């Protein structure tokens, strides 16, 4: 029998110690929530400043939890950009919420690794039911339900979802043997993750075609048809097109139905990326944003953007799960088990790149039960109404103009006197610390984006932002 190694055992917390420290950590988060509105939204540290505040070497001996909490405030917090500030209007929101945080905490407490059904049946089955709930809440087609030919899975990000769509499409088109000839189509407004996904999926350089857009940044489906035909004549194999519902720059909506017409005539896989806008479809009046979703091969939206569920939670569905599984399923001996062999269960490790997976559906379960669909609808509707109000103010201001149509809760605007004035507005707002904005460029012109969607944002925060923008535009 081997002897015990010398020295102390690891400083595991007893359940009672964990309880006591856990209360303190929760207090810390609650204090943060209570004060986040008063903190400058943007961190002002210089590059390297946070690193310099941390020792180069890890501690050899255990350190008191008090010291860790104190350093959290002293060393870490200066380097935090406050995504949960009510004044955060940059990029797209990354919603956190009380129930989601607690759901994630429980998931961490369970420490489950749900790669196979048998490694924790609840991890798989709760996820299936949550994705089915979202199908029903968002009016998605029945073939996405877990008891149909397709099904849904939680991915870490929309980027991973598009990569999985690409590899499934590659599989359907004939797999690696055709790789040299496969061609995929996006538009200039498609999220950059599609380009990354195409590289990872092994598409040849130049085989990701950029289809032109119209005056409202929507993919031109006629041009798509023309480009597909030209590629076929050249002996290439068009196999995939990504339609976007709610583009990153301006929330433009591609004509998914028309894209599906082209795709169906040419056997292209259609992936619909609604990373941000998809959350709005919990409201029946916004379901039009994904018109055509019943015809696509795969669909994704991010509850971690606008549906009160902490990162990471990207919902991804496929019409036919067999193709995805053919593309990603590999069965080493050490993962064989009776349940998988029976064919009666789903093993989610086959639905994405990593094998291991967290119990992410718990936070979604906490969120949907806490807020109810009515609460989620209210969250979205308020933001859209405030964005509508803000867009109206912009329209009536003599020095400002909308740079793109406002459809949901993103307002894109610019100063009529040119880019320098618009850039100055963004810089000044960000310098103030009270709000945070990001920009895009449209037709070569600089555009200020106001993305309304933070969990803590209220109408008065939007009004305060407008007051500041109005004064800057006049000044
Ligand atoms: N697709 C669209 C339309 C997006 O707006 C974004 C991010 O804003 C993404 C994809 C990427 O999302 P993720 O960070 O989940 O990969």
Image: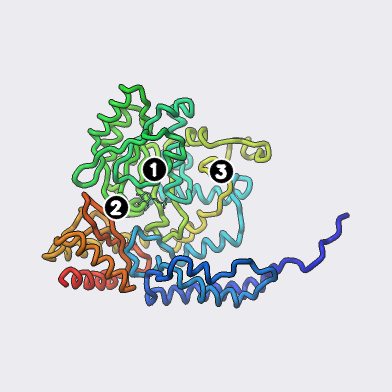
Task: Label 1, secondary structure: give it.
Answer: helix
Which sits earlier in the primary sequence, circle 1 or circle 3?
Answer: 1
Which sits earlier in the primary sequence, circle 3 or circle 2?
Answer: 2
Question: Within 8 Å: ligand 1 and the Cβ of disc 3?
Answer: no
Disc 1 from disc 3: Cα separation:
22 Å
Between 341 and 200, the residue placed more toward the observer is: 200
Please identify the quadrant where the C terminus is shown: bottom left
Check disc 2: other Cα within 10 Å, few if <14, some if 14-19, many if 20+.
many
Q: Nearer the viewer, mark 3 or mark 2?
A: 2
Question: Within 8 Å: ligand 1 and the Cβ of disc 1?
Answer: no
Question: Which residue is pictured at 29% across the width and 40% down the height?
Answer: 256
Q: Residue furthest right?
A: 1
Task: Label 2, secondary structure: give it.
Answer: loop
**Which residue matches tag 3?**
349
Q: Relative to 19, is 222 above or below?
A: above
Please identify the quadrant where the N terminus is shown: bottom right
Disc 3 from disc 2: Cα separation:
33 Å
Where in the figure is residue 22, as x and y percent of width and height?
59, 72
Q: For residue 92, which quarter of the picture? A: bottom left
Q: Name the side, left or right, on which 224 lies relative to 7.
A: left
Task: Label 3, secondary structure: give it.
Answer: helix
Where in the figure is residue 461, as x and y percent of width and height?
29, 71
Visual colour scheme: rainbow
Q: Relative to 84, is 252 above or below?
A: above
**Which residue matches tag 2?**
249
Q: Nearer the viewer, mark 1 or mark 3?
A: 1
Q: Name the side, left or right, on which 56 lies relative to 440.
A: right
Which sits earlier in the primary sequence, circle 2 or circle 1?
Answer: 1
């Amino acid at each position: 029998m081997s002897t015990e190694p010398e020295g102390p055992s690891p400083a595991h917390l007893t359940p009672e110690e964990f309880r006591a420290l856990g209360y303190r950590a929760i207090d810390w988060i609650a204090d943060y929530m209570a004060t986040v509105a008063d903190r400058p939204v943007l961190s002002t540290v210089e590059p390297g400043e946070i690193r310099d505040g941390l020792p180069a070497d890890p501690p050899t001996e255990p350190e008191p939890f008090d010291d860790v909490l104190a350093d959290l405030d002293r060393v870490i917090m200066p380097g935090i950009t406050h995504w949960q500030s009510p004044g955060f209007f940059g990029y797209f929101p990354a919603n956190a919420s009380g129930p989601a945080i607690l759901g994630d905490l429980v998931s961490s407490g369970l420490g489950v690794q749900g790669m196979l059904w048998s490694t924790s049946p609840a991890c798989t089955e709760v996820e299936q039911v949550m994705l089915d709930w979202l199908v029903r809440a968002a009016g998605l087609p029945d073939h996405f339900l877990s008891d149909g030919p397709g099904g849904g899975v939680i991915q870490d990000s929309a980027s991973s979802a598009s990569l999985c769509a690409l590899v499934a499409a590659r599989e359907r088109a004939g797999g690696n043997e055709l790789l040299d000839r496969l061609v995929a189509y996006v538009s200039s407004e498609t999220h950059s993750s599609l380009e990354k996904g195409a590289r990872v999926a092994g598409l040849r350089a130049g085989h990701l075609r950029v289809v032109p857009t119209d005056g409202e940044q929507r993919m031109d489906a006629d041009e798509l048809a023309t480009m597909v035909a030209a590629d076929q004549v050249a002996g290439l194999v068009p196999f995939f097109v990504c339609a976007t519902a709610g583009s990153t720059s301006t929330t433009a909506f591609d004509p998914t139905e028309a894209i599906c017409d082209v795709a169906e005539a040419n056997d292209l896989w259609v992936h619909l990326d609604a990373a941000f806008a998809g959350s709005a479809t919990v409201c029946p009046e916004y379901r039009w944003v994904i018109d055509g979703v019943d015809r696509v091969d795969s669909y994704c939206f991010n509850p971690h953007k606008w549906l009160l569920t902490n990162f990471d939670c990207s919902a991804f569905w496929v019409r036919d799960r067999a193709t995805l599984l053919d593309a990603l399923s590999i069965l080493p001996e050490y993962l064989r088990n009776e349940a998988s062999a029976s064919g009666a269960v789903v093993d989610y490790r086959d639905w994405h790149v990593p094998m291991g997976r967290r119990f992410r559906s718990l936070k979604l379960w906490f969120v949907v039960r806490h807020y109810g669909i009515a609460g989620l609808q209210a969250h979205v509707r308020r933001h859209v109404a405030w964005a509508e109000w803000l867009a109206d103010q912009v329209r009536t201001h003599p020095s400002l103009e909308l740079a793109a149509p406002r459809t949901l809760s993103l307002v894109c605007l610019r100063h009529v006197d040119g880019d320098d004035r618009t850039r100055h507005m963004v810089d000044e707002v960000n310098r103030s610390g009270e709000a945070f904005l990001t920009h895009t460029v449209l037709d070569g012109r600089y555009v200020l984006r106001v993305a309304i969607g933070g969990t803590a944002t209220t109408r008065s925060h939007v009004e305060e932002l407008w007051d500041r923008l109005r004064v800057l535009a006049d000044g």
